[in-house]
Image (cartoon, rainbow, N blue to C red):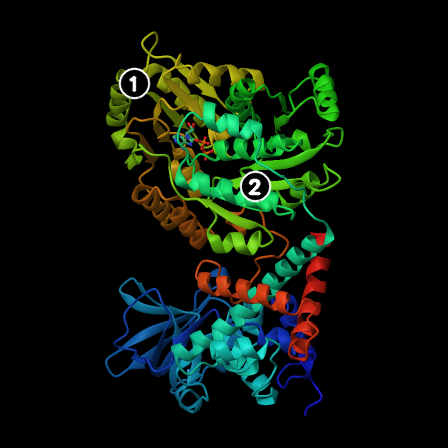
Amino acid sequence: MASWNADTPITYLKGVGPQRAQALAGELGIRTYEDLLNHFPFRYMDRSVLYSAGHVEAGPSEVQVRGVLSQIQTQGGGPKKRLTAQLIGPDGSVELVWFKGIRWVEKSLKPGEDYVAVGRVTDFQGRKNMAHPELETWNSFQQSPVQGLFPVYSTTEKLSSMGLHARGLSKLIQSLFLEWPAQGGDWLPAAIVQQAGWASRNECLRIMHFPSDPNVLAKARQRLAFEEIFLDQLVFAFKRQASLHQQGGLVFQAVGQAFNQFYAEHLPFELTGAQKRVLKEIRKDTASGLHMNRLVQGDVGSGKTMVAFMALLMAIDNGFQGCLMAPTEILAQQHFASLQPWCEALGLRIGLLTGSVKASARKPLLAALKTGELDLLVGTHAILEDPVEFKQLGMAIVDEQHRFGVAQRARLRKKNAISPHILVMTATPIPRTLAMSLYGDLDLSVIDELPPGRQPIQTVHRTDHNRLKVWGFLKEEIAKGRQIYIVYPLIEESQKMDFKDLMDGYESICRDFPRPQYEISIVHGRMKSEDKEWEMGRFSRGETQLMVATTVIEVGVNVPNASVMVIENAERFGLSQLHQLRGRVGRGADQSYCILMTGDKLSDDGKVRIETMCRTNDGFEIADVDLQLRGPGDVMGTRQSGMLDYKVANLGQDQQLIEWARQKAQSTVLDDPRLERPEHAALRMRFTDYARNKMAWGSIA
Ligand code: ADP
Ligand code: MG
């Protein structure tokens, strides 16, 4: 057995001197054998596909081209200096070009030699051209131990100039594997490995770098991806276990008077099957004696507010108070406005607490909360502040979860001696796998059914050329008594250009929709909150027909008579935001429309976003596309403490694997809560190490 291991410094490896070691550490963070092993190829090239210089075509992917090197020369001077050479085949040639590292490259080229060049072929003024190719002599290409799929590694300019371009890195890794044991390295429970039919860990590592064929590669990749996910899911499984043992949850003995009376006398509509199912899940949690931590996902318009209210009634019926927290002032006000009449009918007392509630009103409100005179509190983040004390908080509901962090959930939990039951609701459907990876300590409920009688919103894409027609259409809709939103991007509410766009847009809309025939509201983040509220009020009472606004109306606003959503510069919005905005219409019985206005030119991503919106109304499908386009960190708005920094696993593609890893983690912890069994010895070591690093990360993040 050799004396090195995974932590052996990379300098011990043949071919790595102090200079290369320093560069590897600085550029790619590679310091140890293990770091190098974990620098996986970002893609693979098929070695068996080889073009002759005359036959290759220009194209977007890298190719291998064979030919004889000749006519090496430098051209131009100063910053325009470049090195060119011809790679000549029997039937034509490709020009090779270098703009950087010219001296080093020039020295290494052997004219007259048979070479294989790897790179992207472009068409430059009718000539086939390859910039900064990687070159290998035909002899060495033929003798290479790597056949089949060839690994392509990410590297940097600096490393390339030291011979550590993708091929150089591959050579290093090859020499590492000469020393690395072919088998072993396993820490996953053998039963899981057997069930999946995976090769040993070390073999999988080798296959990742030097796969013989795509199927073998896929299987090896699967094991390494599973391992990454499994460790995170174990963290969740232990967290859940700990919270079960630490403290029991508040027990809601019975569904009581308020709930039953509301259900029998005041419910304005029949609940959907999905609403009933989720309420049953909540009822079961709150009666169980365990602490509820549940995430309810439901698309815009699926009726989460009613579920929230009825869950709050369960708390009140058992002598507790409840609170409902929303991310914006407008939304909190709207929730308050929906809940207040129901509360009145039931003789319950409800309060509203936001940042703009004045001290004079706040004082009696907080007092009533503390004595328990108040049954329900609706509000914004203001609810989290320390002076806000409940007598007995039993149920805390957070609407639009993605705007709140884990830390805020923890603060809510501390609002009562025994943690209140926590329900988080999100209208941006998160793909199930992402939810499980981010909120693995939450149980999931899904409202996957819209109230009956809704017609799907029709979504179309229009450009400025169509503006006259679009305006004509809006006038027709207004003539039918409908109302219209026109939304401008103003992501950072301080951006001057955006603000000017909004104001210019508003002015031209005022010209095209003149008074007194048309009344127009405008709402944006620079307005005082009472002015915003006043304008929103006019629009929701139907006194104005058009609402020109920024994304402040994105979340939750409910005006059922509004039937058209026009989104200006739609290409500048993210998918989930577009979907949220669209959800502002289609709330009544009328056919509703969403019109996405864009310029003529769209980026590739922009095109996909617009096409996706026009194709589907399904929030979960949209969330999946969003995840593919942007990656999990951006979909969630923040990078969550290294949680989703997977090297191999891909949350968009590995959905089944995530489900499986979650099940296995749960059953492992259930079976052997302290990982004491001999068959878990290696797992215990690996997990301890992982959890320690993770906690350290969490406390500084
Ligand atoms: P969201 O899930 O987006 O928060 P809301 O709770 O605002 O949705 O509900 C959207 C609209 O649907 C509201 O006008 C609400 O009154 C109505 N609604 C909710 N549940 C039902 C139902 N079961 N039947 C009919 N209408 C419903
Ligand atoms: Mg809502």
Q: Is residue 361 above or below residue 568?
A: above
Q: Residue 167 versus residue 295: which sits nearer the camera?
A: 295
Residue 216 in which image quadrant: bottom left
User: Which label sits on residue 499?
Assistant: none
- In the drawing, does residue 566 fall left or right of residue 357? left
The residue at 64%/25% (across/down) is 375
Q: Residue 495 versus residue 375: which sits nearer the camera?
A: 375
Q: Is residue 526 above or below residue 461?
A: above
Q: Residues within 10 Å of mark 2 (few under 14, many from 20)?
A: many
- In the drawing, does residue 385 fall left or right of residue 30? right
Mark 2 lies on a secondary structure that is strand
The residue at 50%/67% (across/down) is 100
* Residue holding disc 2: 424
- Residue 167: x, y in percent? 49, 78
Q: Residue 629 versus residue 145: which sits nearer the camera?
A: 629
- Residue 145: x, y in percent? 46, 89
Q: Is residue 581 above or below residue 500?
A: below
Going from the N terminus, do you reach mark 1 or mark 2 first? Answer: 2
Q: Is residue 426 above or below residue 69?
A: above
* Residue holding disc 1: 478
Task: Judge whether residue 550 can be spotted in this image.
Answer: no
Q: Amino acid at mark 1?
A: Ile
- Residue 65: x, y in percent? 34, 78
Mark 1 → mark 2, Cα distance in angstroms? 37 Å
Task: Judge whether residue 638 can be spotted in this image.
Answer: yes
Q: Residues within 10 Å of mark 1 (few under 14, many from 20)?
A: some
Mark 1 lies on a secondary structure that is helix
Q: Amino acid at mark 2?
A: Val
